[in-house]
Amino acid sequence: MQERRRFPRAKCFKGARILAPGQPVVACIVRNVGPEGAKIQFSGIVGLPHTFDLCLDNGRRLRNCRVMWRTSNDAGIWFAQQSETQ
C-alpha cells in the first residue's frame, strides 16, 4: 500500500481521552502520531463524534480533531488545530 501522508508518524502507546460536548469522556490509546494526525484505538462500541478534543499528557495538551476514517475499534484523526492549556 502506498503511503499518502505528508508527514511520517511515530508508533506509540499513549493513553488519552476523547472529550466532546454533551458526550461521556472516552478513554483511548494513541497508536501512532505525527504533526497532522494520529491513529487512536478504543475498546468496544464507542459513539465517536465527527469532531472532538483529544486530551493528551493528563490535560496539559488538547488537540481539536476530525475523524478521517473509522473501524469498530480504531480511528484515524486529523489535528484541525493545536491549543495549549496551562
Image (tube, helix red, strand yellow):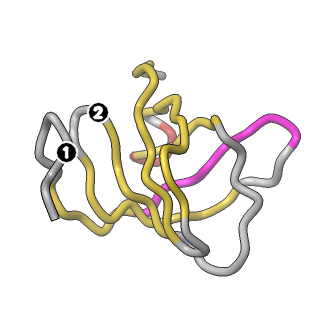
Pick the quarter of the image with the C terminus: top left
Q: Dot 1, how many residues are within 10 Å of its Cα: few (below 14), some (14-19), or many (20+)? A: few
Q: Residue at x 57, y 53 (%)?
A: 17
Name the residue furthest front: 1
The residue singled out by tag 1 in the image is 4
Whole-percent x, y for residue 30 in the image? 38, 60
Kindly report the secondary structure that dominates the magenta region of the rendered protein.
strand
Q: Is residue 19 magenta?
A: yes
Whole-percent x, y for residue 49 in the image? 71, 45
- Residue type at mark 2? Glu
Name the residue furthest right: 22
Q: Residue at x 48, y 44 (%)?
A: 68
- Residue type at mark 1? Arg
Q: Secondary structure at mark 2?
A: loop
Residue 57 appearing in the image:
yes
Q: Nearer the viewer, mark 2 or mark 1?
A: 1
Q: Is residue 66 magenta?
A: no
In this picture, residue 76 sits left or right of residue 19: left
Residue 64's place in the image compared with 73, above or below, is above
- The part of the chain drawn in magenta is 15-22
Q: Secondary structure at mark 1?
A: loop
18 vs 56, nearest the viewer: 18
Q: Residue at x 16, y 65 (%)?
A: 1
Q: Of the numbered discs in the image, which one, if any, rests on residue 24?
A: none
The residue singled out by tag 2 in the image is 36
Q: Dot 2, how many residues are within 10 Å of its Cα: few (below 14), some (14-19), or many (20+)? A: some
CB under 8 Å between callouts 2 and 1? no
Whole-percent x, y for residue 52 in the image? 63, 37
